[in-house]
Image (cartoon, rainbow, N blue to C red):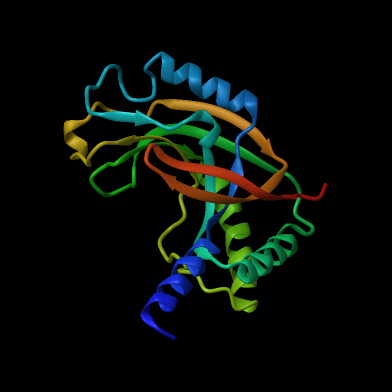
């Protein structure tokens, strides 16, 4: 195969791969309540002037597993793993309890709405079940070993800051919702930020 053909092969191989992750999306009522908090500047201690870029509300979600770029065959196996993972699992009660800077224990780059420890624990069981099934099906992805903190990213900073230089966070949020399904999402990187599309939904079973 000559260099031109190799280039075409690489181009189309990249085009056929999708950047995907498994997530729980928020319902409209929860999104509306978060929007009101942001409008009142409750999420980041008032006017900050720190170059905050809030994400589009339709892009707010809780990521369970980021899987990177996957080809169509792997996506088929990912769908099978997700179908197996939700089997016998009821709708999940989600409690979002406070706002904080993320990631924890690092110079902040984002504003999160953090889930309660109990919510994180339950979602982590589903995450591990799903990822175990992925490994059994031979799907290549990087499994994270750090502690899982379920959260919704609502804003990003233009650059990272020392936590001590930012307004204090940690205000109680007290939002509760019931997740009816997991979603396989595609993330497309655009100039204005990532855009997300739901590829398939996997309803929990009552």
From the top left corner, tell me how far across and down residue 202 is, in percent: 73, 52
Most foreground residue, 4 or 122: 4
Most foreground residue, 81 or 194: 194
Which residue corresponds to the image point at 63% horizontal and 46% vertical from the top-left? 198
Most foreground residue, 101 or 26: 26
The single residue placed furthest to the bottom in the displayed view is: 1
Q: Quadrant of residue 10?
A: bottom left
Most foreground residue, 185 or 191: 191
Name the side, left or right, on which 75 lies relative to 155: right
Which residue corresponds to the image point at 46% horizontal and 49% vertical from the top-left? 149
From the top left corner, tell me how far across and down residue 148 is, in percent: 47, 55
Q: How many marks?
A: 0
From the top left corner, tell me how far across and down residue 89 is, in percent: 75, 54
Name the side, left or right, on which 42 lies relative to 163: right
Q: Quadrant of the N terminus?
A: bottom left
Q: Quadrant of residue 147?
A: bottom left
Q: Is residue 5 above or below residue 20?
A: below
Q: Is residue 195 above or below residue 173?
A: below
The single residue placed furthest to the top in the displayed view is: 40
Name the side, left or right, on which 81 lies relative to 205: left
Which residue corresponds to the image point at 50% horizontal and 24% vertical from the top-left? 34
Q: Is residue 91 above or below residue 85?
A: above
Name the side, left or right, on which 57 lies relative to 82: left
């Amino acid at each position: 195969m000559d260099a031109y053909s190799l280039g075409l092969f690489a181009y189309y191989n990249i085009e056929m791969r999708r950047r995907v992750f498994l997530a729980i999306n928020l319902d409209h009522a929860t999104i509306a309540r978060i929007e009101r908090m942001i409008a009142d500047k409750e999420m980041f201690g008032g006017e900050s002037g720190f170059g905050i870029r809030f994400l589009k509300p339709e892009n707010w979600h809780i990521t369970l597993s980021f899987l990177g770029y996957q080809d169509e065959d792997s996506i088929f196996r990912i769908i099978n793993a997700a179908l197996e993972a939700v089997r016998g699992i009821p709708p999940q009660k989600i409690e979002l309890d406070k706002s904080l800077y993320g990631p924890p224990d690092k110079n902040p780059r984002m504003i999160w709405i953090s889930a309660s420890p109990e919510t994180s624990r339950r979602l982590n069981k589903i995450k591990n079940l799903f990822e175990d099934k992925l490994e059994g099906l031979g799907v290549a992805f990087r499994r994270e070993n750090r502690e899982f903190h379920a959260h919704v990213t609502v804003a990003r900073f233009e650059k990272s800051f020392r936590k001590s230089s930012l307004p204090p966070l940690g205000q109680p949020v007290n939002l509760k919702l019931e997740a009816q399904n997991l979603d396989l999402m595609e993330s497309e990187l655009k100039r204005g930020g990532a855009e997300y599309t739901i590829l398939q939904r996997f309803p929990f079973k009552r």
